[in-house]
Image: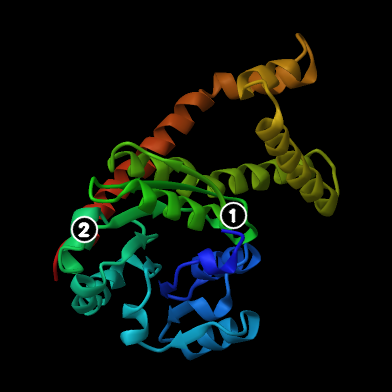
Amino acid sequence: MNDPTEWPLLALIGGGQMARALIGGWVAGGAIAERIVVVEPAVDQRAWLAEHFPGIRLLPEANDAVSQAAVWVLAVKPQLIAPIARSLSRWVTTRQPLVISIVAGIRLTDLSRWLGNAPRVVRSMPNRPALLGLGATALYAGSDVTPTDRALASRLLHAVGSVVWVDTEAQIDAVTAVSGSGPAYFFLLIELLEAAGVAQGLPPAIARQLAIDTAYGAASLARTATDDPKTLRQQVTSEGGTTAAALAIFSAAQLDRIVADAVAAAAARAHQLADEFGRDP
């Protein structure tokens, strides 16, 4: 959508961090700010958006301006979505927008019910690196979402990073556990690597820089290399060398089992939260 006229009128319900990332990506991609409407009740949030994205329309609550949008992006906390979605339902039957939810833990059936049985709903799970345009987003849509809708949803979320589609909504829980929560796993590893470097005598600032830059370089190499991560690991592991000594400790501690158990726990919790947040008050 390099031509600004190709961008639909977009309505964001919620003006928090992820909404900011999306707006930034859209504007950088050629969207006209005047074609973006944001509903955000917090005065300070609206002030920040007005300063950083001149021209976008900011509303304290939804009104007919939202109803004119071809695409609604729901970007609020999961515990707030039910009443907000119900308040939007009066416009759904007449406008029939494409609804893209980035609300964590809310299933399509619940969203559709609250929206007055809206048929065209896409569920997505972006992650925090989207703030830098380096996010990883998975999407899922029901059978009522057309190929054209799917292509549009892909383009809109691709503005903040990579996009994949999953085949079943149940897989969104796995996505949440792998990429949604995943940045925290890597932050923890960086934190621990930094602490270990300090314990080995490095100054804290140097240990931190080395840990962060090593993580960045390794991820960049894994992303661009033709070899898979296993092969890359083998290529930097000489028999009897320093890397092999370190990896032997990971193996003895069953790091593979620890990671598998951690991801399984996150996926189970995602399922539980979907049950909890999907209930009607």
Q: Is residue 8 above or below residue 261?
A: below
- Kindly indicate the quadrant of the structure image that contains residue 218: top right
First along the sequence among labels 2 and 1: 2
SS at circle 1: helix
Determine which of the numbered discs, if any, sits on residue 129 in the image: 1
Identify which amino acid the numbered label 1 is placed on. Answer: Pro
Q: Local crowd at mark 1 within 10 Å, few (<14), some, or many (≥20)?
A: some
x and y percentages locating residue 81 in the rendered image: 28, 70
Q: Local crowd at mark 2 within 10 Å, few (<14), some, or many (≥20)?
A: many
Determine which of the numbered discs, if any, sits on residue 119 in the image: 2
x and y percentages locating residue 177 in the rendered image: 41, 43
Residue 221 in view, yes or no:
yes
Say left or right for 150 vs 29.
Answer: left
- Between residue 155 and residue 259, name the one nearer to us: 155
Say left or right for 79 vs 138.
Answer: left
Q: Is residue 220 above or below residue 144?
A: above
Quadrant for the N terminus, please. Answer: bottom right
Q: Residue at x 20, y 68 (%)?
A: 115
SS at circle 2: loop
Q: CA distance from mark 2 to mark 1?
A: 30 Å
Q: Residue at x 75, y 9 (%)?
A: 239
